[in-house]
Image (cartoon, helix red, strand yellow):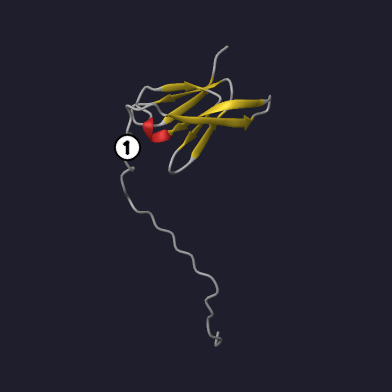
């Protein structure tokens, strides 16, 4: 093979070990910041809006709800509940009827 080699595509993947970022909560204040109309499958609902950082561990809310944070917005449908775990994670589950 006397032809020169031409590099057309090159991919590199790496993994960097790191610890999970800490989740900080202000807590103590009412996390509800207002409300707005939100459209769900069954109807339009007047839906409370919450500030994610104002939740404390063990807080819980009933849907419908909108939870706003710096990194995301979470829409909780009617008939769902959200529980804040001790590590700050939000667990959403269908409400038992």
- Answer above or below: position of 88 versus 17: above
- Secondary structure of residue under mark 1: loop
Residue drawn at (33%, 34%), measured in percent from left and top?
A: 25
Residue drawn at (49%, 26%), measured in percent from left and top?
A: 92
Res 43 quadrant in image: top right
- Answer above or below: position of 43 versus 11: above
Q: Nearer the viewer, residue 85 or 69?
A: 69
Res 41 quadrant in image: top right
Residue drawn at (48%, 65%), measured in percent from left and top?
A: 11
Residue 40 in the image, given as x and y percentages of width and height? 65, 29
- Answer above or below: position of 77 versus 17: above
Residue 84 in the image, given as x and y percentages of width and height? 40, 26
- Answer above or below: position of 16 versus 97: below
Residue drawn at (40%, 58%), measured in percent from left and top?
A: 14
Q: Quadrant of the N terminus?
A: bottom right
Q: Quadrant of the C terminus?
A: top right
According to the picture, the residue beneath numbered tag 1 turns out to be 24
Q: Nearer the viewer, residue 93 or 82?
A: 82
* Left-right relation of 83 to 5: left
């Amino acid at each position: 093979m006397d032809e020169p080699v031409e590099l057309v595509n090159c991919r590199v993947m790496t993994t960097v070990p790191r610890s999970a970022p800490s989740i900080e909560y202000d807590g103590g204040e009412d996390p509800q910041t207002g409300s707005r109309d939100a459209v769900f499958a069954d109807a339009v609902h007047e839906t409370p809006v919450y500030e994610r950082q104002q939740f404390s561990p063990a807080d819980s809310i009933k849907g419908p709800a909108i939870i706003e944070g710096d990194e995301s917005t979470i829409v909780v449908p009617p008939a769902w509940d959200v529980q804040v775990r001790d590590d700050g994670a939000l667990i959403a589950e269908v409400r038992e009827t």
